[in-house]
Image: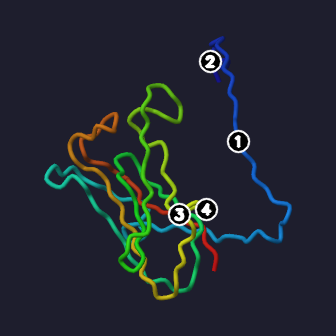
Amino acid sequence: MAEQLGDSTKSSYALRYTVNYTRDVDAVKPLQLGILAAPDCDTFYEVYRNDDEPESLTSTEFTLPKDMTVRLAVGHQHTGALNISIYKNDEFVCASKPRYGTKDGVVGNERGYLVQMSHCIDEASGPLVLKKGDKVRLESYYYVGSHDPRLAYSDGTHLNVMAYMYIGYED
């Protein structure tokens, strides 16, 4: 791109990745993929500045229509997020938490921006076994106070935020 604009500056990029594989393909069980979203499966919503109550909660609850085992769950939220959590029958299961960048000009660690969400459920935590009739609740928290020191800029209002939990499960 730099050369197209007449700039003689050249850049080099490198990718690093790890590939895990198994020779025993019959041992691999396919996962179904799904998304839980709050509030009420909305694609996005707004949270507004409130210095009297600086933590804004949005949630949704549903009754499970069938048995399933959740093997992976990771949240998706936007800047201003505090966490997104799963509850089973009113008992806390886990939370996916944001990591905010801390460096200026460092790709993937941009100061003041949400750069990663932790896993809520994964191989290390073990699966979440759910039975037909279980009540599952998703709770999403955003910080809506006037000043959030984690962020590059915030007056507390965040528009078009999301509260998703991506899940990988088997029946």
Q: Secondary structure at mark 1?
A: loop
Marks 4 and 3: CB-CB under 8 Å? no
Q: Along the horizontal axis of the image, is 123 left or right of 40?
A: right
- SS of the residue at dot 2? loop
Percent coordinates x, y for residue 10 in the rendering: 67, 16
Q: N-terminal of the two: label 3 or label 1? A: 1
Give the residue type at disc 4: Glu
List the residue tagged with mark 2. 5
71 relative position to 106: left or right: right
Q: Residue at x 44, y 44 (%)?
A: 99
Q: Work out whether mark 4 precedes mark 2 in sequence or the reverse, and give the earlier one.
A: 2
Foreground: disc 1 or disc 2: 1
Pointer 1: what residue? 17
Which residue carries the number 3 mark? 121
> Label 3 to label 1, Cα distance in Å?
22 Å
Q: Earlier in the sequence, mark 1 or mark 2?
A: 2
Residue drawn 36% across the image and 66% down it:
139
Q: Is residue 32 left or right of residue 47?
A: right
Residue 136 is situated, as x and y percent measured from the top left of the image, at 43, 77
Gap in angstroms between the C-alphas marked 2 and 3: 46 Å
Image point 57% across, 61% down: which residue?
122
Q: Which residue occupies the extreme top position in the image?
A: 8
- The label shown at residue 123 is 4
Q: Nearer the viewer, residue 77 or 18?
A: 18
Residue 92 in percent (x, y) is at 38, 70
Q: Nearer the viewer, residue 24 or 144?
A: 24
Q: Disc 2 or disc 3, which is closer to the eye?
A: 3
**Local secondary structure at mark 4:** loop
Looking at the image, residue 102 lies above or below residue 89: above
Q: CA distance from mark 4 to mark 2?
A: 47 Å
**4 vs 2, front mark:** 4
The amino acid at mark 2 is Leu
